[in-house]
């Protein structure tokens, strides 16, 4: 019992470590989402920067157009001044008052046009100055936005690197702890199985022999007392019967502690006996199917496979209320495949998170021998539990 409680506590600690790894995974996912949001913000800033650049180009083009307009206005002013000079020459030459008046009106008209063009030129120059000032302001804002963008990127990269480094170190530490704990749990399980085998052998070899001796002595005593017609002969017979029952119980306990013989075909023999005992104890049909011999040299691996099959059959009878059970054992493609199917009520929907001791024990035993355990249903509704063990595990251990 202490070993079982210790094993359960270690299993709970391992589940807590796995939960911590999942929390770290969720933190990594949140960091990725933050990075994605910051990336979107960076893209928005880049688009805003691109709009400002296009606006600056448009303003520059307007300034160029205004400059051209100013040049054209200056040219018109120069032409008007030339006309005025020409009219003044004509004014000095002419003697006709009418011509003088017409020339004077032309001069006044040209002067009005010149004033108008000068005003337009001033307005154009002011517009050019305003555009230039706005362009300088836009350039300063663009430069500041670029600097902020680079700073944000640098900060994001630094935060991501630091957090990734911390998470990597934490994950490495947790993985190392999980590996070490798994190794220790496997060692505890292996030692537990060896201790069960030793206790089973001691019960069979020591206690069983002693009980057999008691049974023989009691049988002799019963015959002597019966031959002398002594009343205690009945008590001796009762003691003999109890001794025989004790021998059977001892052998049954020893068989339960050490169900597999130390031989390559021990697993097949134990499976066949388990199927027969299941039919006799629970009044169900339990078929063992092994068309080709499956020989395992590793007694510990064979014991784990047998315990998994035993637990699956027990669940099918007690919880699934199955009437027909099939236990199949085969070796193919470098693996040993155990399959237990039944026609019972099936497994619960939340089978992946089930806290049942039996299911957790099966998973734990499968992990200890590097096997894969799958629980599902066939198209016809049968519950199927399969355990696939690499053949090299059974050879190397």
Image: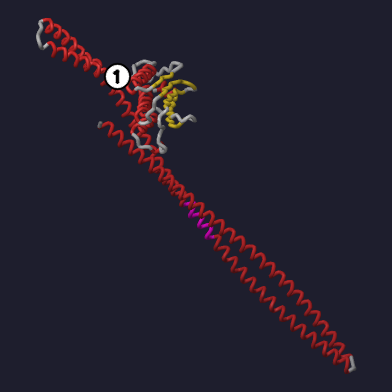
Residue in the image at 32% along x and 28% along y = 189
Say whether residue 212 is left or right of residue 227: right
Q: Residue at x 48, y 21 (%)?
A: 332
The overriding secondary structure of the stretch rendered in magenta is: helix
Q: Is residue 61 above or below residue 105?
A: above
Instruction: Tell me if residue 91 comes above or below residue 281 in the rendering.
Output: below
Residue toward you, 393 or 327: 327
Hey, which residue is sitting farthest top in the picture? Answer: 227
In this rendering, does residue 52 appear at all? Answer: yes
Circle 1 residues within 10 Å: few <14, some 14–19, many ≥20: some
In the displayed structure, would residue 13 be above or below residue 127? above
The tally of labels here is: 1
**Can residue 183 be seen?**
no
Left or right: 84 with respect to 318? Answer: right
Q: Quadrant of residue 76?
A: bottom right
Name the image quarter holding the C terminus: top left
Residue drawn at point x = 56 percent, y = 56 percent? 43
Residue 37 versus residue 371: which sits nearer the camera? 371
Assess whether residue 157 is covered by the magenta stretch.
Answer: yes
Quadrant location, the N terminus? top left
> Residue 86: horizontal and vertical position, in percent?
85, 84
Residue named by callout 1: 255
User: Can you give x and y, in whole percent of width and height, for residue 339 in the image?
Assistant: 43, 25
| Image x and y of residue 228, in percent | 10, 5
Residue situated in front as seen by the camera: 252 or 363: 252
Q: Quadrant of residue 68?
A: bottom right
| Closer-to-camera residue (244/172) | 244
Residues rendered magenta in the picture? 147-158
């Amino acid at each position: 019992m202490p070993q079982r409680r210790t094993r359960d506590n270690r299993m709970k600690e391992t589940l807590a470590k796995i939960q911590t790894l999942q929390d770290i995974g969720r933190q990594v996912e949140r960091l990725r989402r933050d990075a994605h949001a910051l990336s979107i913000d960076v893209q928005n800033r880049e688009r805003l920067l691109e709009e400002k650049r296009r606006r600056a180009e448009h303003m520059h083009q307007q300034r160029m157009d205004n400059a051209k307009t100013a040049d054209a206005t200056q040219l018109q002013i120069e032409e008007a001044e030339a006309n005025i000079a020409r009219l003044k020459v004509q004014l000095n030459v002419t003697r006709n008052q009418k011509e003088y008046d017409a020339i004077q009106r032309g001069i006044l008209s040209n002067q009005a046009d010149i004033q108008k063009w000068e005003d337009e030129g001033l307005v154009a120059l002011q517009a050019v100055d305003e555009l230039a000032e706005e362009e300088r302001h836009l350039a300063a804002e663009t430069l500041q936005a670029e600097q902020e963008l680079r700073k944000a990127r640098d900060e994001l990269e630094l935060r991501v690197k630091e957090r990734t480094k911390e998470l990597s170190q934490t994950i490495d530490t947790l993985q190392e702890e999980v590996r070490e704990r798994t190794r220790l749990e496997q060692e505890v399980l292996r030692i537990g199985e060896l201790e069960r085998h030793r206790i089973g052998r001691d019960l069979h070899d020591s206690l069983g022999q002693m009980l057999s001796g008691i049974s023989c002595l009691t049988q002799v005593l019963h015959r002597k007392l019966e031959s002398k017609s002594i009343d205690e002969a009945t008590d001796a017979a009762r003691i003999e019967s109890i001794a025989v029952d004790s021998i059977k119980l001892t052998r049954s306990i020893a068989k339960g502690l050490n169900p597999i013989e130390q031989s390559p075909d021990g697993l097949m023999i134990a499976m066949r006996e388990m199927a027969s005992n299941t039919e006799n104890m629970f009044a169900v049909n339990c078929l063992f199917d092994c068309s080709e011999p499956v020989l395992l040299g590793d007694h510990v691996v064979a014991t784990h496979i047998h315990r998994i099959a035993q637990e699956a059959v027990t669940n099918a009878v007690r919880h699934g209320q199955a009437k027909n059970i099939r236990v199949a054992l085969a070796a193919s493609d470098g693996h040993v495949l155990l399959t237990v199917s039944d026609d019972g009520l099936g497994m619960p929907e939340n089978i992946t998170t089930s806290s049942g001791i039996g299911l957790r024990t099966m998973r734990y035993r499968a992990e200890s021998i590097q096997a894969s355990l799958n629980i599902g249903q066939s198209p016809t509704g049968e519950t199927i539990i399969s355990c696939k063990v690499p053949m090299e595990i059974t050879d190397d251990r």
